[in-house]
């Protein structure tokens, strides 16, 4: 419905895949509440907090990427329920992260 909802996908050291919404749970709704890669870490462009790939999509609250309810990671595909995307529409309405 005209709103970009961006995800971040990370592979940890053991090969596991972590998926989350690319917005900070603490800094949102700031338009700069998104993450960019800094070496092997992700860094919040709003407050500067960094975290390890293993923490992506896992931690509830704080300066962490927003976990996705009901996400399923298979061998060749990632499935995200439409309801989870719809629930984040308002959060991403004024999001200012990169869209490419």
Image: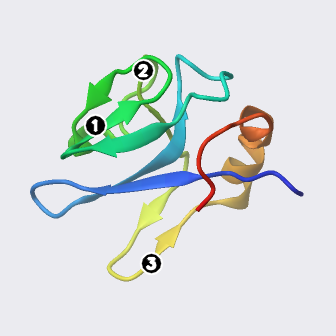
Numbered tag placed on residue 4 in the rendering: none
Q: Is residue 80 above or below residue 64?
A: below
Q: Which residue is mark 2?
A: 63
Q: Quadrant of the N terminus?
A: bottom right
Q: Residue at x 72, y 39 (%)?
A: 92
Mark 3 secondary-structure assignment: loop
Foreground label between 2 and 1: 2
Tell me where residue 5 appears, x and y as whole percent. 68, 51
Q: Which residue is mark 1?
A: 55
| Marks 3 and 2, how far apart at CA | 27 Å
User: In the picture, residue 16 is in which quadrant?
Assistant: bottom left
State yes or no: discs 3 and 2 in contact (Cβ < 8 Å): no
Tell me where residue 68 appears, x and y as whole percent. 53, 46
State yes or no: discs 3 and 1 in contact (Cβ < 8 Å): no
Foreground label between 3 and 2: 2
Q: Residue furthest right?
A: 1
User: In the picture, residue 21 is in which quadrant?
Assistant: top right
Q: Which residue is mark 3?
A: 77
Q: Is residue 75 above or below residue 42?
A: below
Q: Residues within 10 Å of mark 3 (few under 14, many from 20)?
A: few
């Amino acid at each position: 419905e005209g709103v970009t909802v961006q995800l971040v996908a990370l592979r940890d050291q053991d090969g596991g895949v972590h998926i989350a919404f690319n917005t900070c749970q603490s800094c949102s709704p700031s338009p700069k509440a998104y993450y960019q890669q800094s070496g092997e870490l992700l860094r919040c462009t709003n407050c500067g907090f960094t975290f390890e790939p293993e923490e992506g999509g896992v931690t509830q609250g704080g300066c962490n990427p927003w976990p996705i309810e009901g996400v399923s990671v298979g061998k060749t595909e990632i499935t995200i329920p439409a309801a989870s995307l719809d629930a984040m529409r308002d959060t991403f309405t004024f999001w200012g992260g990169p869209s490419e």
